[in-house]
Amino acid sequence: MDITLKLLTTDDEIRSFFKVMKELRGHLKEEEFLDNIREQEQLADFRLLGIYTDGEPEGVAGFRISKCLAWGKFLYVDDLVTLPVERSKGHGKRMMDWLIDYARQQGCARFELDSGVQRFGAHRFYLRERMEISCHHFSLIL
């Protein structure tokens, strides 16, 4: 079994992970996916990390590096998901480890993410990975 992690840069690479991302972001439309990613790249230096097993897309993480007064320079994970049939095979941990190493290489002081309150399995995973619940995130739909 060949497991590969790769930053996704080409249109075809990005499109090949739509099915995986849709597991987390069910509202996404395939015909808008690539344009949405490209716009996020322009606005926030957004990137996608894909994980393949034997060449098949099985997990993806969307992330960006930013800086703010509260945290200094940080890597923020917008999306982290694997296909349901591939969960508990270590893909999430592999992506997290890669992202944390990348954040350190980029001089980030912190690694941050938000997780929906209903995602109990994800919360167990993040806590197991030594992450802390550090704040409440509030939102207002406009």
Image (tube, helix red, strand yellow):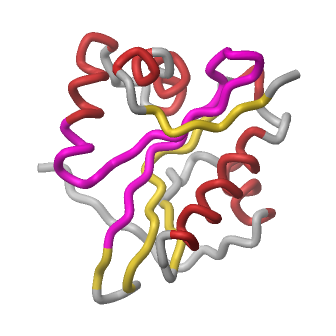
* 109 and 31: which is toward the camera: 109
Q: In the displayed image of the protein, which residue is found farthest to the left?
A: 142
* 5 and 133: which is toward the camera: 5
Percent coordinates x, y for residue 116 in the rendering: 50, 51
Percent coordinates x, y for residue 38 in the rendering: 24, 33
Residue at image location 50% in from the left, 68% down from the top: 112
From the image, which quarter does the N terminus lie in? top right
Q: Quadrant of residue 71?
A: bottom left
Residue at image location 39% in from the left, 79% down from the top: 73
* 57 and 26: which is toward the camera: 57
Instruction: Point out the stretch of residues depicted in magenta.
Output: 39-66
Residue at image location 31% in from the left, 16% down from the top: 29
Residue at image location 26% in from the left, 44% down from the top: 41
SS majority, magenta: strand
Q: In the displayed image of the protein, which residue is found farthest to the top?
A: 31
108 on left or right of 118: left
Percent coordinates x, y for residue 139 in the rendering: 28, 60
Percent coordinates x, y for residue 67 in the rendering: 31, 77
81 versus 53 height, above or below = below
132 versus 119 height, above or below = below
